[in-house]
Image: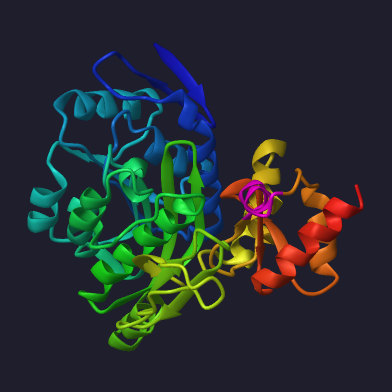
Amino acid sequence: MIIEEGRARISSDEFVFYNPKMKELRDISSLYVRVKAKKGMKLLDSTSASGIRGIRYYLETDKTVEPFFLDVNEHAYKNTLKNLKLCKIKAQVENLGIREFCNTFKGKFDIIDFDPFGSASPELFNLMRILNDDGIIMVTATDTAVLCGAHSNACIKSYSSVPLHNELCKEAGLRILIAYAARCAALFNIGIKPEVSISKMHYMRTFIQTKYGAEAAVSSLKQIGNGAFCSSCKRVYYEKGMASCTRKECDKCNKELVRFGPVWLGDISDKSVIKEMVGISADEKISQFLTLLMEELETPFFYSLPKLTRNLHLSSVSMKNVLALLKAEGDASATQFDSSGIKTALPVESVVRAVKQAVGST
């Protein structure tokens, strides 16, 4: 089967994984690499499968990056070789597992793409070992049921974090993934700065610019903390620090809180990078999604309007109207995590007041 995607033209068969539904994410990834790439950067496609991602990065950066392909599966290895020949690209391909490769490879990479099937946790530590100073790592996790709390013990085991299993689970899961990446990086004196972070469909993905140095590593770790959620009034408490958020009851309701974490509580995106990506995007749907990310507040967590109105025993409410009312009082935005969710640093009382006012105006 011949597939045309972006500038790439590849072949794929039943033994090699290729998911056409993930084209949008590959498009976004290519935009990011195009913004960040500099001549001669060495790029590792560490889970290459058909090789589609690394091939696209090479072609769509006008051959700026130097790709290297890795996959433990022999069929994938052979298919990548075939596709490189099809696209007339000369690049090195290895048929090894990530752990073996990272323990034997003598060089380092400026950009690493890590898109595993399932959890990112088993091999992320190994990949940090071969990341160049001030390099870039793009990390995907498809174990969203784990990160979103459906399998809480598995999240504790894989990510050393207690997840949430409610309306905030997608954002909490993404922040758990970033916190785990920060802890892995810190072991190598590497600090992290997430520049694009996405939770969509069945995956979570974060694009991370790193900075080498003990000070940068410690600074990143200080962006990690813990949280607590009140299922009664929907209030979220969170505090940065290694021994944070020890409270057990809600200040307002006196209800027992659901505690979670550690999670990343710093920014999950760099708006200037996303703006550059929007500027070179030729796809309207992707541009709209990236614009949503660019306009989304960096305040951790959000309010789900349907959950809030149900809790208040109110009828449904216009998100547009609630946003307008909140913006008159302070900052507020839509969020990628919930089409009916609102982000704001304003207290929950302000959100409740806006919701009641919006219901009254309908």
Q: Is residue 207 above or below residue 5?
A: below
Task: Tell which residue pokes out farthest to the bottom in this image.
Answer: 215
Residue 124, position in %: x, y? Answer: 24, 56
* Residue 158 falls in image quadrant: bottom left
Q: Quadrant of the N terminus?
A: top left
In the foreground, 114 or 94: 114
Residue 170, position in %: x, y? Answer: 46, 50
- Please name the predominant secondary structure of the magenta segment in the image: helix
Q: Which residues are magenta?
A: 304-313
Residue 338, position in %: x, y? Answer: 60, 47
Q: How many marks?
A: 0
Identity of the residue drawn at 70% across and 71% down: 349
In the foreground, 201 or 43: 201
Residue 248, position in %: x, y? Answer: 38, 75
In this picture the colour scheme is: rainbow
Q: Say if residue 228 shows up in the picture.
A: yes
Identity of the residue drawn at 42% across and 47% down: 204
Identity of the residue drawn at 50% across and 58% down: 231
Identity of the residue drawn at 56% across and 48% down: 31
In the foreground, 59 or 260: 260
In the foreground, 354 or 342: 354
Q: Is residue 287 left or right of residue 266?
A: right
Q: Is residue 208 above or below residue 100?
A: below
Q: Is residue 137 above or below residue 227?
A: above
State yes or no: residue 121 in magenta.
Answer: no
Task: Tell which residue pokes out farthest to the top in this image.
Answer: 1
* Residue 331 falls in image quadrant: bottom right
Q: Is residue 195 left or right of residue 17?
A: right
Q: Is residue 94 above or below residue 299?
A: above
Q: Say if residue 62 shows up in the picture.
A: no
